[in-house]
Image (cartoon, grey):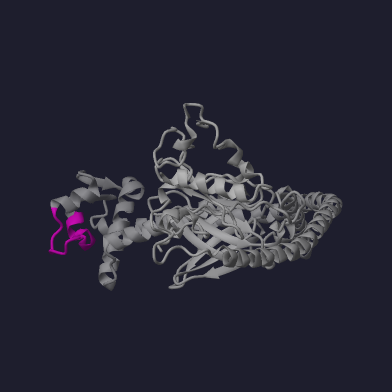
């Protein structure tokens, strides 16, 4: 007589004693839930749930897998794809893989999964009442948090709607101020342009005077240079025939550049351009330029202050770079800002009327710059408010009051900073700059408003841009609980906040894992 026959014999005797009990209703093969008991009728053949076979009921739980869907072996480990239902009276029922049945490890708190080992020493004790009591206490504690958090959430909703209305009213107010500011800006712009035109006209005569002064100075310099050229020409032209000849060049020490006591043919050819003689006119036009270069080198040698060629070149490069930078900077000057040429002139020569015109133009420029600054500030504020209104702060604006609020978490190595709806950063405790782990993007996943995505962070070394998922759960005070990096450059954070404390929400039960499969 097998195990199942003994079981049914026991039921028969039981029914004979308690005839008033409907025994059919209590017959339930091991390993199935009560709601499925009607599918297992002892006096009928059993039909596999997938309809593949019909087998005698005595084959049910006979430790041999007959049905491909494992429905005939709910209480044994015969089928690799089967499951076992733990009733766990007093606690939460549980479904485990049938491979764990009678494996010597207690998975059900009532010990029903180890039914074949019940008579062994150290068998599974029924801990369902104790676990159920602890679970109920925890559920009550969590429920209290949800009730209190729900009240805070209602306050956050009211605050969010209030903030939205304030922002909308502020934008309306700013539009009115902005129109006035734009009118002021346009008026000051017109006044500035008018004042600068008057200033330009007033300074035109001084520009002409300065140009004439510079021209005269240039003429003086040119005349001085010519006189010096004539003087040097006469010094070299020792025979006074108005020509410089090779013999005269040989006698002029300045042409001896290598200081060897004689003027070589190469040195003569450089100055005379391979000619036998040079006229005064040719000397003034060409020879004088070359001779001045030789005289400059001679003077530097005399003072022992000659600079190496590479140093001189470096200076030229630096001057060129400075000039380029100045030219680049000039490209960034705003088009609506103009500067007069008054600073180029000697202000001491201005008459009182001109000075007054210049001062009025200066004041007009300052007034425009101030009006333009105020107008731009208003534009920025309006843009910021509009961007804030366009953010998704939840279906009832329950997150609006948290916009921009920052929360930190420290671990052994880093300090993490989460600024809601803005960005997330990481700072090493050993020093260094902050690393941006992501910038606010959107809500993701289901249910909605439980996971925040921050992406477009700084690039990892030879990797992608950093991104962070922030998982939200109910809590009475906003707090950043954890920060991890499950994948390279991908971070995960847990954050508690009252805004997600919704009563009667369905929270999925945690699945059974191998880590919970403890031995006896």
Residue 262 painted magenta: yes
Q: Residue at x 74, y 55 (%)?
A: 199
Viewer can see residue 489? no
Q: Quadrant of residue 317?
A: bottom left
Q: Is residue 350 left or right of residue 252?
A: right
Q: Seen in the image, is 494 located left or right of residue 296?
A: right
Q: Quadrant of residue 320?
A: bottom left
Q: Residues in magenta?
A: 248-264
Please provide percent x and percent y for residue 171.
Answer: 82, 52
Give coordinates of residue 13: x percent, y percent. Answer: 56, 48
Q: Height in image: 66 above or below 241?
A: above
Give the residue displayed 67% in from the left and 59% down from the top.
342
In the image, 17 versus 263, the foreground residue is 17
Residue 344 in the image, given as x and y percentages of width and height: 61, 59
Rendering coords of residue 116 (x, y %): 42, 54
Q: Is residue 293 magenta?
A: no
- Location of the C terminus (image quadrant): bottom left
Residue at 23% in and 61% down: 254
């Amino acid at each position: 007589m097998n195990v199942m026959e003994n079981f049914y014999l026991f039921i028969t005797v039981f029914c004979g004693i308690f005839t008033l009990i409907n025994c059919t209703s209590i017959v339930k093969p091991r390993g199935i839930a009560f709601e499925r008991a009607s599918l297992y009728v002892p006096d009928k053949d059993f039909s596999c749930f997938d309809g593949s076979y019909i087998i005698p009921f005595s084959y049910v739980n006979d430790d041999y897998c007959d049905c491909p869907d494992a429905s005939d072996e709910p209480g044994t480990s015969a089928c690799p794809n089967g499951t076992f239902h733990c009733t766990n009276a007093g606690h939460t029922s549980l479904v485990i893989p049938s491979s764990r049945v009678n494996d010597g490890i207690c998975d059900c708190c009532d010990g029903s999964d180890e039914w074949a080992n019940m008579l062994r020493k150290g068998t599974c004790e029924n801990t369902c009442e104790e676990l159920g009591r602890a679970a109920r206490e925890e559920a009550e504690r969590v429920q209290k948090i949800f009730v209190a958090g729900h009240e805070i959430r209602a306050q956050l909703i009211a605050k969010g709607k209030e903030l939205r209305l304030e922002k909308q009213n502020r934008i309306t107010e700013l539009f009115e101020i902005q129109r006035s500011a734009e009118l002021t800006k346009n008026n000051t712009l017109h006044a500035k342009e008018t004042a600068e035109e008057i200033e330009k006209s007033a300074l035109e005569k001084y520009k002409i005077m300065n140009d004439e002064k510079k021209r005269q100075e240039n003429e003086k310099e040119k005349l001085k240079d010519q006189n010096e050229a004539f003087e040097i020409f006469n010094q070299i032209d020792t025979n006074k025939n108005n020509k410089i000849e090779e013999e005269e060049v040989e006698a002029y020490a300045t042409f001896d550049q290598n200081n060897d006591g004689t003027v070589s043919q190469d040195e003569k050819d450089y100055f005379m351009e391979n000619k036998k003689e040079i006229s005064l006119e040719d000397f003034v036009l060409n020879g004088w330029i070359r001779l001045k270069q030789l005289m400059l080198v001679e003077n530097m040698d005399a003072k022992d202050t000659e600079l190496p060629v590479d140093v001189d070149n470096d200076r030229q490069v630096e001057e060129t770079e400075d000039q380029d930078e100045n030219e680049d900077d000039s490209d960034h000057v705003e088009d609506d800002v103009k500067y007069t040429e008054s600073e180029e002139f000697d202000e001491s020569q201005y008459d009182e009327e001109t000075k007054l015109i210049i001062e009025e133009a200066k004041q007009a420029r300052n007034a425009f710059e101030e009006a333009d600054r105020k107008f731009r500030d208003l534009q920025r504020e309006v843009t910021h408010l509009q961007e804030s209104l366009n953010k998704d702060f939840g279906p009832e604006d329950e997150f609006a009051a948290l916009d921009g609020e920052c929360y930190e978490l420290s671990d052994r190595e880093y300090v993490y900073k989460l600024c809601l709806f803005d960005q997330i950063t990481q700072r090493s405790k050993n020093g260094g700059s902050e690393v941006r782990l992501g910038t606010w993007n959107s809500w993701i996943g289901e249910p909605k408003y439980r996971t925040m995505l921050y992406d477009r962070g700084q690039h990892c070394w030879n990797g992608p841009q950093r991104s962070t998922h922030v998982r939200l759960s109910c809590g009475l005070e906003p707090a950043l609980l954890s920060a991890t990096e499950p994948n390279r450059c991908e971070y995960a954070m847990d954050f508690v906040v009252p805004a997600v404390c919704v009563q009667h929400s369905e929270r999925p039960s945690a699945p059974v894992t191998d880590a919970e499969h403890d031995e006896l």
